[in-house]
Image (cartoon, rainbow, N blue to C red):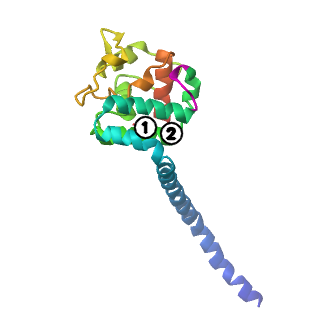
Amino acid sequence: MSNESLSPQPASNSESQSQPLSLNSLSERIDRLEHKLDQALLLLTDLYRYRKLRDLLATENWREADEETTNIMLEIMGKSSLDNIIPDEVMNFPCSALQLLDQLWMSYSNNRFGFSVQQQIYTRLGGNDDISDVDMKVLQAMGTEMGWMVNNKLLDYEDLDFSSSAPVGCHPSGWWRSPYGAKMAVYFIARLMRCGIK
């Protein structure tokens, strides 16, 4: 009897030696599935929220799509206008919403517009995710390349190019027009980077 109770023990030990690998593998798979489920639930629960934006992007109505993007972001943050958002609050913007907004813009613009395009331009010009480093030369170069600035002067929103031939990265553009200016831009780009939007 005691021999029988001992004989399963070696099998149990060998199983426990292989279990960490199996458990680790299983844990990684569960994490991936949970991430996919979260994305699917976000799409289902927010279908109404994003439908109008999707339809505007599908018809290349870039200006209204831009305005709708700002409205969605304000709604998510529970704010009535850009004036009511401080830079620190942007650092908590939900990554899943940023990813979805970016995917919509990228998909319907053939990868010309979107937050990831803007973040890539910023990084290529020497920007980083250090919120204490507000490099005006990088921000001005970014604004110029994306068609937001001419001769280092920020264009009025109405003067931006909302055609399909607008400079790469030009939109979404309305969200960036915060009264906190460069500081808000750096905080928002840092959030994009930390959310893995690239």
Residue 156, numbered label: none
Can you give x and y, in whole percent of width and height, for residue 75 in the image?
Answer: 53, 34
Q: Amino acid at mark 2?
A: Cys
Q: Is residue 81 magenta?
A: yes
Circle 1 — which element?
loop
Q: Is residue 121 left or right of residue 31?
A: left
**Residue 80 seen in this snapshot:** yes
Q: Earlier in the sequence, mark 2 or mark 1?
A: 2
In the foreground, 39 or 119 = 39
Foreground disc of the pair 2, 1: 2
Q: Is residue 135 above or below residue 23?
A: above
In the foreground, 127 or 6 = 127
Instruction: Report which residue position mark 1 lands on.
Output: 197
**Quadrant of residue 123 within the rendered picture:** top left
Instruction: Report which residue position mark 2 lands on.
Output: 95
Q: Local crowd at mark 2 within 10 Å, few (<14), some, or many (≥20)? A: some
Q: Amino acid at mark 1?
A: Ile
Can you give x and y, in whole percent of width and height, for residue 78 in the image?
Answer: 58, 32
Q: Is residue 22 above or below residue 148?
A: below
Residue at image location 29% in from the left, 26% down from the top: 162
Q: Is residue 57 magenta?
A: no
Can you give x and y, in whole percent of width and height, for residue 177 in the image?
Answer: 44, 20
For the residues labelled 2 and 1, say whether their Cβ atoms are less than 8 Å apart: yes
Q: CA distance from mark 2 to mark 1?
A: 8 Å
User: Which region of the structure is painted magenta?
Assistant: 78-83
In the foreground, 168 or 162 = 162
Judged from this view, the residue extending furthest toward the left is 165
Q: Quarter holding the N terminus?
A: bottom right
